[in-house]
Image (spheres, rainbow, N blue to C red):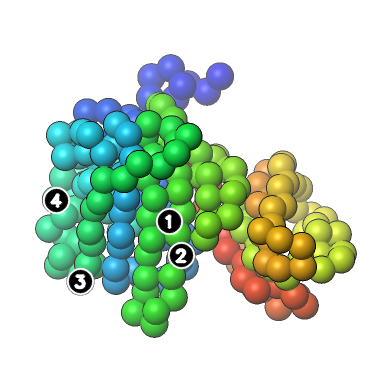
Amino acid sequence: MDVLDIIGPVMIGPSSSHTAGAVRIGKVAVSLLGTKPVKAEIMLHGSFAETYKGHGTDKALLAGIMGMEPDDERIRNSLELAKEEGLEYRFEKVYIENAHPNTARIILWDKDGRTCSIEAASVGGGSILVKKVNGMNVEFSGQYETLIVLHEDVAGMIAEVTYFMAERGINIGSFRCVRKEKGGAAVMIIECDSVVPKSVVDEIRKQPHVLSCVKVEKLK
């Protein structure tokens, strides 16, 4: 058990689930986009939907999308800061079947029209669990450096990418590969025990049949 499981994270706001966890969900979303967002659609389910204004979940999610940490004093003013930075945003209450009560679904766009989406839950003590990326079922916590590799579903892709990482001394802590259909798009979720250099991410992107490779930094 980590000490944060006992005392919780250092943060701004009344609730680790509604503030620290929400900030971290926002940070993962913007990491996946990889560029500065200009538009955000944020859908809130369950407890998030019922109490987001009172607990400041809206401010926390936007703060994370703008790159803030859970203890950043600016979280209180994130709605205003988002407008100053030209970040258009919209919140919507939704029902997501079988979702954790503290779940957010976020869609981001950058100025060039690139987009990404995630569905993630704040599961207590500031911890999160990402459940979907671009509509595909995944599962990772952000407690490790994580590579998300979108690729064509062809034979040998898993071996190629994992062997490539092993050659560069990167140990894989956990691995999952999911796909929508055989021969279509698939995504690898690779949690790593060590720092993954940008050069490795860039090299993976260049591999045949790899559509994209994004690194999600270990959450603080």
* Residue tagged 2: 116
* Residue tagged 1: 29
Q: CA distance from mark 1 to mark 2?
A: 8 Å
Q: Nearer the viewer, residue 56 or 216?
A: 56
The part of the image, by quadrant, that contains residue 54 is top left
Mark 1, other Cα within 10 Å: few <14 / some 14–19 / many ≥20: many
Of pointers 2 and 3, the one earlier in the residue sequence: 3
* Residue tagged 4: 77
Callouts 2 and 4 close, C-beta under 8 Å = no
Measuring from the top left, give residue 12's x and y in whole percent: 24, 36
Measuring from the top left, give residue 71's x and y in whole percent: 29, 40
- SS for callout 1: helix
Type of residue at label 3? Gly
Quarter of the rendering occupied by the N terminus: top right
Callouts 1 and 2 close, C-beta under 8 Å = yes
Q: CA distance from mark 3 to mark 4?
A: 15 Å
- SS for callout 2: strand
Of pointers 2 and 4, the one earlier in the residue sequence: 4
Q: CA distance from mark 4 to mark 1?
A: 20 Å
The part of the image, by quadrant, that contains residue 102 is top left
Mark 4, other Cα within 10 Å: few <14 / some 14–19 / many ≥20: few
Type of residue at label 4? Asn
- SS for callout 3: loop
Measuring from the top left, give residue 183's x and y in whole percent: 77, 68
